[in-house]
Image (cartoon, rainbow, N blue to C red):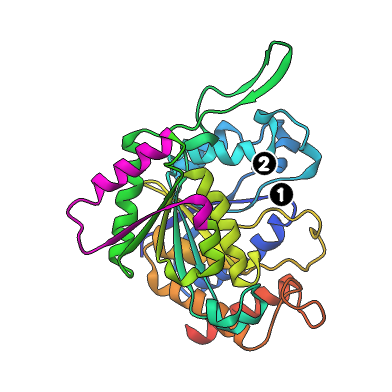
Amino acid sequence: MNKKNILILPGDEIGPEITTEALKIIDYFNESKLTNISYEFADIGGASLDKCNKPITNETLERARDCDAVLLASVGTPKYDNNPRELKPEYGLLALRKHLNLYINIRPIFVFNTLSEYSSLKADLINDLDIVIIRELIGDVYFGEPRGFKDVNGDRVGYNTMLYSESEVQRITKFAIETAKKRDKKITSVDKANVLECSQLWRQTVDRMMSGHDDIELQHMYVDNAAMQIIKNPKQFDVILSPNLFGDILSDAASMLTGSIGLLPSASLSDDTGMFEPIHGSAPDIAGQGIVNPLAMILSLGMMFDYTLDRQDLAKIVKQSVNDVLQSGYFTKDLSSKDYISTSEMGDKVLEMIKKLC
């Protein structure tokens, strides 16, 4: 069995709590000889600023490049909210994405039917929901230059650059096509081509990339309409292909279809490596109370087994175990304010189910 090396970044606020629950599963798989995974830790975000006055160090960036995968918990803490951009915790995450060339972001939006009553939508709209959002991750306005502040005729102006090259759109579209072929063969490409030149190039490039893929249905949709349609009729979607900014907003909106943002994982991939993290933030308001939902972190570990470690069997076991725990009626406080179990207890319940399935 080949040895795999992963870098674990617990990060800020609730990060260490949910990391502990994922480690229980890795340790069990290792002890059971199902895997041969070594892991080491590093700091990012506020945790790195506390120690090094940098949101991420060059050493951590290189360690991330040298490992097989990165497992990240959460980034962000209010104590650094007023820092300049380069010294904000979130800048460490942007720098890591760029350094590893993580241009593909995969955000699955699925519903455990046991939890359909917790969604803001009626159960018949979201039962068996299964969408995947493919978001380009290292382009767009988040990384475009120039950016900054300046004075114009005595008025302070903030400015950013929304920018995409054809090659950037081509490679993310290629991945979306490959994903669609394994699913229901439908892609909805999101843009704002009626007003943005950047979106016009996006749409033109997607159209060219789709040439010869007649087995896949392609639909273009303006982002404002897409936001409405995700709430109105989410089951119409299969694969959503989106630029960075629009994908960030749409995926967070779609996450609430599931009943809790604490349930959804994500994967960020390059052609060589991957980083896996929950889509939720660092939740400083509940940090240290033992009530955070660790399931998104556990499911992110499952995605790591699927996409980078080539252990689809273990990925299925992790997801099935989460489903079985929920079906058994165990919930954290985000899902049941009266009758709930702690973060640690939820991790233990998932591990018990994993042991049964193994």
Residue lying farthest to the top in this orientation: 153
Q: Secondary structure at mark 2?
A: loop
Q: Are marks 2 and 1 in contact (CB under 8 Å)?
A: yes
Instruction: Determine the residue positioned at 47% across, 83% down.
Output: 358
Q: Three-letter amino acid code at disc 1? A: Asp
Q: Which residue is under mark 2?
A: 45
Which region shows up in magenta? 197-226
Q: Secondary structure at mark 1?
A: loop
Which quarter of the rendering shows the N terminus?
Answer: bottom left
Pinpoint residue 317: horizontal percent, then vertical percent.
47, 77
Q: Three-letter amino acid code at disc 2? A: Gly
Q: CA distance from mark 2 to mark 1?
A: 7 Å
Determine whether 253 is above or below 125 in the image.
above
Asked whether, in this view, residue 53 is left or right of residue 57, the answer is right
Q: Which residue is under mark 1?
A: 12
Q: Is residue 215 magenta?
A: yes
Q: Is residue 225 magenta?
A: yes
Residue 236 vs residue 2, the one in the foreground = 236
Pinpoint residue 76: horizontal percent, then vertical percent.
70, 45
Determine whether 195 is above or below 177 in the image.
above
- Please count the marks in the image: 2
**Could you say which quadrant of the image residue 331 lies in?**
bottom right
